[in-house]
Image: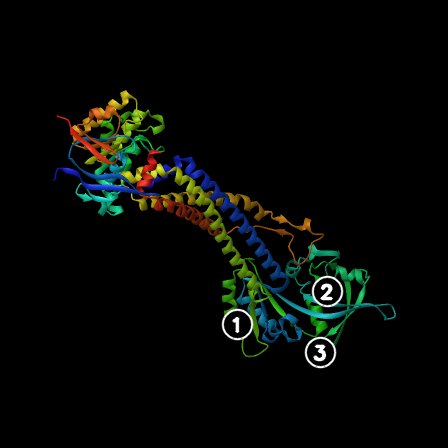
Amino acid sequence: MEDKLVVISKMSKAFPTGEGDFLALKNINLSFAKGEFSGIVGPSGSGKTTMLNIIGSLDSQTEGEVKVMGYEIKELSSKQAADLRSRHLGFIFQTYNLLPVYTVYENVEFPLLLLSMSKEERHKAVMQALEWLGLTDKIKSRPAQLSGGQCQRVAIARAMVKQPGLVLADEPTANLDTENSLHILDMMKKLNQELGTSFIFSTHDQKVIDYLRRVIRLVDGEVVSDDTKAR
Amino acid sequence: MFDFILKGIFRDRSRFLFPIIIISAGVSLMVFFLSFMDGYIESMIRQNARFETGHVKIVTKAYNELISQKPYDLGFLDNQEELDVWKTEYPQFDWAERITFGAILDKADSLGNSLSQGQVMGFALDLIGGDLEIRNLRLKETMAKGRLPLAPGEILLSDRTFEAMQLQLGDSLMLLGSTADGSMAFAQVVIIGTVVFGYEALDRGGIIMDLEDARSFLDMPGGSAEVLGFLRSDSYNDKEIKKLTTAFNDKYSTEDEYSPLMLSLSDQNGLGYILWITDFTFLMMSLVFILILGIVLWNSGLMSGIRRYGEFGIRLAIGEEKKHIYRSLILESLCIGTIGSLIGLLLGFIFSYPLSIWGLDMSQYGKTSTMVFENVIRTKLSIGIFITSFIPGICASLLGTALAGTAIYKRQTSQLFKELEQ
């Protein structure tokens, strides 16, 4: 049980609508181990992002249990949830979501400002993350001066800088061309292998699916398949 | 984190430019209006002080009971020794004695038959011994005809009465009244000049005569009805003056109805109420300023907040709490409010300073100079004005952001997060 980062059992999520509740996720039972490189795949509206939000403690389930790093999501206060995100989780988004007024260095440094770290420690960690992603020559650039691929690399550096146990990546290649997508995926795979960081993707991009070691298919809020490729 | 927030403010023009413009414009206007109002109030205080009340006034207790009737028969008699003591004890004041009285002015022909008569209100002050009262009543500026009295028996008359009685400069007239002890009083006076008082009751029949002439006419040797004290600094502080009058009265006022009683400017003519209203108006202006600017900045904060939902979403995802984001917005608004207010103070100073030196000449709006009202109104800049304008600038910024920031609290974390993808 200790090597399980995420354990989901009998989890459902409903959203209220004008005509009653809409069940976005139905009776989900899943677990993710340390070091996994897995993805939740499915068409739009299948519940992928909702599941990532719940795992990321940005939302909570309606029924069932979701434990992340041993913490039951539904029982977390907003402070505890924020603490879980700041210490243990990293997020990567389809639209990068870099803070446009800050430089590459400052964007990557931002998550560390929420942790009790000295300036020297932050500098060391930021430079290391930028080195992993090959961005040391861009530290003073602003997001607007970077290509899409570079922006996503900055976003990955930002997610990785605090060396979280789990990175949640929501459609990370949706805005990238094939070459950049493959480059980004290579990098994430390398980080997964070298640092042991777990990745959970939400995607319907076949390029991403091809990289995944474990593919969980979601259709209309239900898990229809859960396949792990042989190493 | 503070550095990080500051960088964010100054690199994002849309985040600071509009609020800073609004705050600095508001604060500069506030500095200008408050300094103008303060200047006007000070001018009003000065006018009242020099014309009627002094910054302090010493009268007998009996006189004070009927002060609105100006009962000179209840005034001081031969009080020069006491006055010398007060002059030594309160060197911050210039002292002037006055008597106000009623009389009849009679113009007679060569046979002594009356040609015309008029009721007059007499103002007796020291015209020959010094120029303090000449300056107080702005006599040089408000003279319409003739010259100032230089010798005993010479008086000034209201210009309107002078015309109504068809007098000539140099005419010798009889003044009829009653002495302090109730006997008939007669004096021969010479009309040597005319003045415009700018105060209806006096323009209908006011005369100005030298104090010594009035003492002789009213049989009040060495006496006076009122002793006025004028601050040399001309800066009236009601609280300080109140302390001083209390101390004086504790020391000099006794059960004797002719013992002296010191009155502050605000004790007279309802001026205390006017000063209170002024303070209240200043407070109301500050609150209205905070409210209006707060609403404008609230709206601007909402627009900016909507634009920044994506930023808030990512900050939540990274691990900030909503209340931490809210606090950082308040900190931003504090910085913006401080900068905007400082710029506003500078602009306000630039607008107001020339007017505090040269003033606004109001004489063009009236036909002539008057004794009661000053022609030039000046702004008055003070540390108090700057503080009164600076604080609302910051408060408005904080209020606007605090209201706009509540939208973050009302929004679900997951909803803010979803907006990242939009």
Q: Is residue A230 left or right of residue A141?
A: left
Q: Are marks 3 and 1 in contact (CB under 8 Å)?
A: no
Q: Nearer the viewer, residue B80 or B384?
A: B384
C-alpha distance separating marks 3 and 2:
21 Å
Q: Is residue B172 above or below residue A184?
A: below
| Mark number, residue B249 | 1
The residue that mark 2 highlights is B207
Q: Are marks 3 and 2 in contact (CB under 8 Å)?
A: no
Image label count:
3
Pointer 3: what residue?
B182
Q: CA distance from mark 2 to mark 1?
A: 33 Å
Of mark 3 and mark 1, the one earlier in the sequence is 3
Q: Residue at x 15, y 26 (%)?
A: A229
The amino acid marked with disc number 2 is Ile
Residue in view at x 50 percent, y 45 percent? B26
Q: Residue furthest right?
A: B111
